[in-house]
Image: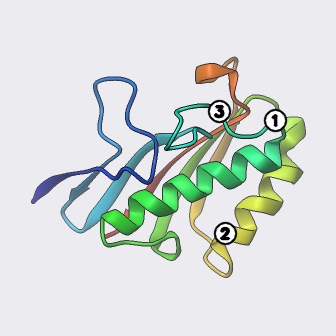
C-alpha cells in the first residue's frame, strides 16, 4: 500500500514532494519547517516558537494519516545552530510527552527560508 497524505492544516509542499507518504504500516513525513499553513510565512523568531510550529505541522500531517505524535518511531532534526539544542529539546519534549522516539540531531549550514529548525519523522500508521 502506498498513499500520498496531504492536509491544508500544514504547509503545502514548496517543491516536487508530498507532505507525507503512508506505506506498509508506516507514515513517512517530509521535513517540516515553521511555516504557517494559512499564510505560508515563517512563524516565530525564536527556536522555541519555531519548534512549536514545526511540531504542530507534524501533528496535523500525522493526524491526517491516521497516526499521531505518540506513534513516531524516528525523527531527524536539523538545527541551524546546535547552541539552540536545549531550548529546542524543551519544546520537542512537551509535544512528545512520554514517547521517546529514536532521533538524530544535526547542525546544518542553512535551512529553507533561513529558519532555525526542520524535522522529518517516521511514525506507525
Residue 92 at x, y = what percent? 71, 60
Residue 26 at x, y = what percent? 29, 63
Residue sitting at 68 percent across and 39 percent down? 43
Residue 42 at x, y = what percent? 65, 33
Question: Could you give the CA–CA distance between mark 1 and mark 3, rounded to whole angstroms?
Answer: 8 Å
Viewed as shown, does residue 122 lie left or right of 79?
Answer: left
Viewed as shown, does residue 21 lie left or right of 69?
Answer: left
Residue sitting at 16 percent across and 54 percent down? 3
Mark 3 — residue?
42
Number of numbered labels in the structure image:
3
SS class of the residue under badge 3? Answer: loop
- Image: 77 above or below 102: above
Mark earlier in primary sequence (1, 2) = 1
Residue 105 at x, y = what percent? 67, 44
Mark 1 — residue?
45
Q: Nearer the viewer, residue 5 or 122?
A: 5
Mark 2 — residue?
95
Viewed as shown, does residue 13 lie left or right of 39?
Answer: left
Mark earlier in primary sequence (2, 3) = 3
Question: Could you give the CA–CA distance between mark 2 and mark 3, rounded to whole angstroms?
Answer: 20 Å
For this orientation, the residue located farthest to the top is 109
Residue sitting at 45 percent across and 74 percent down? 71
Residue sitting at 43 percent across and 54 percent down? 9
Amino acid at each position: 500500500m502506498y498513499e500520498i497524505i496531504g492536509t491544508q492544516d500544514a504547509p503545502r509542499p514548496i517543491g516536487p514532494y508530498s507532505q507525507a507518504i503512508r506505506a506498509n504500516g508506516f507514515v513517512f513525513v517530509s521535513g517540516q519547517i515553521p511555516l504557517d499553513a494559512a499564510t505560508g510565512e515563517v512563524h516565530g523568531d525564536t527556536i522555541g516558537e519555531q519548534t512549536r510550529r514545526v511540531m504542530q505541522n507534524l501533528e496535523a500531517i500525522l493526524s491526517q494519516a491516521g497516526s499521531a505524535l505518540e506513534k513516531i518511531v524516528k525523527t531527524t532534526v536539523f538545527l541551524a545552530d546546535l547552541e539552540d539544542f536545549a531550548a529546542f529539546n524543551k519544546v520537542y519534549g512537551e509535544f512528545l510527552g512520554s514517547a521517546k522516539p529514536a532521533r538524530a540531531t544535526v547542525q546544518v549550514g542553512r535551512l529553507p527560508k533561513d529558519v532555525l529548525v526542520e524535522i522529518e519523522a517516521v511514525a506507525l500508521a
